[in-house]
Image (tube, coloured by chain):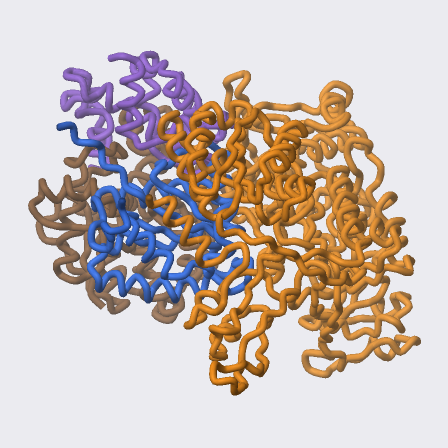
Chain colours: A purple, B orange, C blue, D brown
Amino acid sequence: MDNNLLKEELIRISGAKPVKCMSCGKCSATCPAYEQMEYHPHQFVNMIANGDIEPLLNSKSIYKCLTCFACVDRCPRGVEPAKLVEAVRLVSVRKQGNNHLTANDIPQLLDEEIPQQALVSAFRKYTK
Amino acid sequence: MQRIGVFVCWCGSNIAGTVDVKAVAEALKNEPGVVYSANYQYMCSQAGQNMIIEAVKEHKLTGIVVCSCSPRMHEATFRKTAEAAGLNPYMVEIANIREQCSWVHKDMATGTEKAIILGKAAVAKVNLNAPLTPGESPVTKRALVIGGGIAGIQTALDIAEAGFPVDIVEKNPTIGGKMAQLDKTFPTLDCAACILTPKMVDVAQHEKIRIFSYSEVEDVTGFVGNFDVKIKKRARFVKEDVCTGCGACVEKCPMKKIPNEFNLGMNNRTAIYIPFAQAVPKVATIDANACNMIKNGKCGICSKVCTAGAIDYTQKDEIISEKYGAIVVATGFNPISMDKFDEFAYNQSKDVITSLEFERLTNAAGPTAGKLLRPSDLEHPHTIVFVQCVGSRCASCAEKGKEYCSKICCMYTAKHAMLTRDKYPDTEVYVFYIDVRTPGKNFDEFYRRAVEEYGVKYIKGMVGKVSPEGKKLKVQASDLLNNKQIKIDADLVVLAAAIEPDKSARPLATKLTASMDTNDFFTEAHPKLRPVESPTAGVFLSGACQGPKDIPETVSQASAAAAKVIGLLVKDKLKGNPCVARSNELMCNGCSSCERVCPYGAITYEDKEFRMPDRTTKVRRIAKVNPAVCQGCGACTVACPSGAMDLQGFANNQIMAEVDAICK
Amino acid sequence: MQVEEYKPLIVAFCCNWCSYAGADLAGNNRLNYPADVKIIRVPCSCRVNPMFILRAFQRGADGVILCGCHPGDCHYTSGNYYTRRRMALLFSMLDYLGIERERTRVEWVSAAEGAKFAATMNDFAQKVASLGKNKRLEDLRCKK
Amino acid sequence: MKFSYYPGCTLKNKAKDLDEYARKSALALGVELEEIENWQCCGGVFTTAKDEIATKLSSVRALKQAQDKGYDLVTVCSACHNVIKQTNFAMQDEEFASKVNNYNGEVYDGSTKVYHYLELLRDVIGFDKVKEKVVNPLKGKKIAPYYGCLLLRPNGVMKMDDPENPKIMEDFIRAIGADPVYYANRNECCGGYVALEDAEQAKQSSNRVSNNAVNCGAEVIVTACPLCKYNLVKNGSKIPVIYFTELLAEALGVKEN
């Protein structure tokens, strides 16, 4: 998809406002998944604003976000970075065959105690 | 019939870019009454004004329409031009084809069409204009300064030096304001007290200045040159003129656990107190909420130890009424509450403080006698993290903080960082910044010195979370330039809290009918050309009540406001606004409707003899407007059931003519 | 025959101290609103006689909006309170006459609210345009 | 006092304790919880996508049922609470609501009041009343409240408490006679569902929380979320992690009956 169209699509899905970002980096400062991410929350915002979206779509970073909303609540500009990360992930997993988790993967991930909640959440986040 | 000249201004390309000015001039030529029509690049320039004067003479004009910028900008200019040409200045009308036309419309055809209609409305109005002569009113040669910080002090001193009496109203027990709480000042690092306290003494000793401390403005009526102000002097339970400020009462007061406002609650004071050693007036004040004697009559020690006999537990609030010619607002600022930013743990740890608290911690007269010790355990901090922009530059949709840049934080943080490194070289100092903003004389050099000579570590990025754990504050932050998330174990975290106007400003603005912006900063009459005047005549602005400012800027504005006040007070008489209400006595039936709605009490009634057609005389009650008191709002004109009351300059037939012209 | 695009005719009365300054601020910030809006400056919103509004409708205006300082912030202390009460009466009378409620409006716009001014005018013009031409009070004899 | 009650799937299975003690305690406090009929799983997490309705339907149905019965809706599980409350908020947007309503064939406008069980204790019953009913105060017990992210954020929607310095669980702990332990990471994420994607990441996140609590002197951590409990325990929390309802039941003396 054309980068600008893709950007519009991400903004439409997320309802977030990357243009409001003032590059303070507070989202990345607060992110608990920072170390696991190749692209960090502030880079998601910045790269989406610049239409540089392909690298994000292909990065594992989109599966590392915990949707804990710390970046959303602490952002002084109301940008809502977590919603942008989710939008990128959705654009990826909505494509046929792009599910990040399948039913076949589940048995080896299970243990005695794991709550159902974890499974349904993971399915909701990683598959379509 | 009027002979009207129309002058269409291009305003460079500001108007001509979206309005075909020639077409406008051409179209208006055919309007009734118009005998001359012209256009010019800059109508407000000397050449433009001369063009108007020439045209008035050559074409014997009786009225002028200028199609240009907002009348709020240049109506006064063109009225003076008309006067110079021998016309009555009130024979001028402005069609606002810049702010309300060329700047808000993009398309030439639309802009031109609208400009012509606005011009037609102005022509229609001028056709009905009549020469007006303003009345005169005397000027009370005394100024009121509200707020006794550095802004109020400077303004008061300048006005008093020019020979006019000045009263300062200060809500705290002492003048001095925020500057009295500061340690050093940037970028020169002179000590705040050393440069402020002599000025405070000057104020106290100046024969033209009176200080009403512990007082508030209760009510303001009147108008420029003639304000009537009621000042509430709160009971301090100490006779100001008797107290010597010896401090014996403070020493003996048994209520010793009251949070000390002057040190931002970082230590305690007594119930009877003098805020700080250099306070002006140096008079004790009893905090009625804390004093046992006042609350339940059980104590009275201060009264016993006071050899001067200054204590008076029965003192009551006192209302003082005074007349003033001019009022200066200098209500200043406060740091915002950190409640909505507790990711920085301000409410969770004593060792997370604001920058103003840091000032007190480093001030020799502060709670630690100037030793930098952290509040929780009074140990020397070895790692300090400064966080900039806490609550500044927040988007409105984030629903916390302020949208504006607080302007002073970059510089005072550089100062704090530099002074810390200077005095305690063993201390690591980090400053997290989004941008470092240093536009000011010697400002950037100062900031660079902090980095280059003092080794302050500036890191571009924001702190995300401060987690108090044991004796440490675990700071998690962004280092954007290195694309890293960094973690620092700090001993002290200092937040550069956004500043906001003092809470007393909003109710004061209402009393003064002075306007404010959405952030509760006072608005200026013109953002560039009249920055120290409020749009309300006779009300002037000094210091941070108008917007965030550092000390040099505050002092410049304070002196500028004083100059404006002096310019007003030297006049013996002020020309009023001739656009006042007038009653047509033949139509008036004396019903009192107008009197009831008049906010100024400008309308009175008199009995007047009228000759009737049958040669008898009849006495009727009719309304009379006092033009010196009327401010020209027009409320009475609408209330009048018989249509006798009209407003000069905005008469019924004039406004109706404008409506007709627009709707044609 | 080509149908000309319908453009409503809107008269805006703005008080000198707040709303007129707000309109100027909208101009300073280059905030667009329809050219159909024509502003008449009055010292205070309470200067606006209901007669002026009726006159505008009589002469073919499609909408009339009245802007003043926020309640409590009137330059003349209390003028906008009079406005509020008077206009409540006038608007209910217009309602009785069958003039759509959306054709008239009172709005408080401060000198600092340029954006609000533009947004208000955009919204008002759009609502009035959607109602179409006001024919009920228009006096055709006034048109030549 | 009667409320509609949405337990959620985990509470019927791995987190039976959370549910059982919530019901027992409610009874003891004079509150009747009527389980939503035929409730469906909320999905575990809220999908922020503005263009998705399918993932929100089950929550809307529960909310609608509560409204039809005329009750406010009570939840216990943090995740369910977060999903249902965010969905409820989304339904206050007319455009979004019309899409969902068209699909569901019923009208719902986001007006059902949703309480988390803790809010029920604080706002409806009152912590002072809870305190009165405590027969077995947990004196001297040092308890670290663990909020996680779901109860507090996004604050604009959840509006439970100050998201950065919350008090509700602390007040709850005081009401049952124990001592709350302050620790800063009480509102940080445990790692959540990422446990399935990257066990190491979940371990880091969980340890950050539990170690902080231990270092601040806690003897036990309480939570309202089964996934938080799982992550903290699985990743080696040095102190036990239990549900707040269990503590409540114990304090009210209804744990064993």
Nearer to us in this view, B376 or B184 = B184
- Does any portion of residue B437 appear in the rendered image? yes
Give above or below for C118 relative to C69: above
Nearer to us in this view, D231 or B389 = B389
Residue drawn at the location 40% of the way across and 30% of the way down: B111
Give above or below for D245 relative to B305: above
Residue drawn at the location 35% of the way across and 19% of the way down: A61
Give above or below for C74 relative to B292: above
Residue drawn at the location 77% of the way across and 25% of the way down: B442
Position in image of residue C16 (x %, y %): 52, 50
Number of numbered tags placed on the structure image: 0
Nearer to us in this view, C26 or A37 = C26
Which quarter of the picture shows residue B249?
Answer: bottom right
- Does any portion of residue D13 appear in the rendered image? no
Position in image of residue D48 (x %, y %): 27, 34
Q: Residue extending furthest left?
A: D105
Position in image of residue C93 (x %, y %): 27, 65
Position in image of residue B377 (x %, y %): 69, 46
Which quarter of the picture shows residue B605?
Answer: bottom right
Q: Quadrant of the C terminus of chain B?
A: top left
Give above or below for B117 relative to C70: above
